[in-house]
Amino acid sequence: KTATLYTTLLQELKRTGGEKDSTCFFTLNDLGLFYLNNAAYVKAESVLLQAASLIKKYRGEQSVSNATALFNLAELYNRTGQLEKAETGILEGLAILEKLAQTTDEERVIKLNNLGELCREQHQYEKSEH
């Protein structure tokens, strides 16, 4: 039922404001996270990639929104065992936030911890210590 509500909202947003309305890509992102949290990984990836594409197009690659989209995709890839893609997403997202000076120490620690866990899961112990 939740997915249906998101889908209906997206259709209405596209009809009235078009895809460049930030509500549209944030709703897509929320739908992707809904699918992710319900282990519908194929649907989650499709929707999260669509959201990320729109965010890059309308907010730019060097935006906090894009970093968030990369972190969400990294979480999906982590859960589906695509650890190299997950690592790339975390590193790219962190680089954006650091460039924009938009990360708190706490957020940085959390993302670096996530990255360390990925390295550990890949048995890249030396890398996880750095």
Image (cartoon, rainbow, N blue to C red):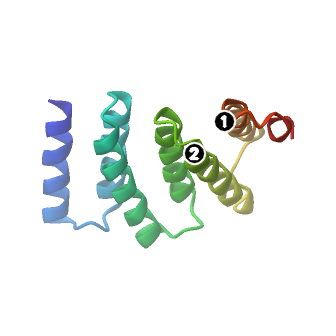
Circle 2: residue type = Ala
Q: Say if 118 sits above or below 23 in the image.
A: above
- Residue drawn at 34 percent across, 29 percent down: 39
Q: Quadrant of residue 31 in the image?
A: top left
- Residue drawn at 22 percent across, 68 percent down: 18
Quadrant housing the C terminus: top right
Q: CA distance from mark 2 to mark 1?
A: 8 Å
Q: Nearer the viewer, residue 23 or 35?
A: 35
Q: Position of residue 100 (x, y in %)?
A: 69, 61
Circle 1: residue type = Leu
Identify the disc placed on residue 86: 2
Quadrant housing the N terminus: top left
The residue singled out by tag 1 in the image is: 118
Q: Position of residue 5 (x, y in %)?
A: 16, 38
* Element on which disc 2 rests: helix
- Residue drawn at 86 percent across, 35 percent down: 129
Q: Nearer the viewer, residue 88 or 82?
A: 82
* Element on which disc 1 rests: helix
Q: Residues within 10 Å of mark 1 (few under 14, many from 20)?
A: many
Residues at discs 2 and 1 in contact (Cβ within 8 Å): yes
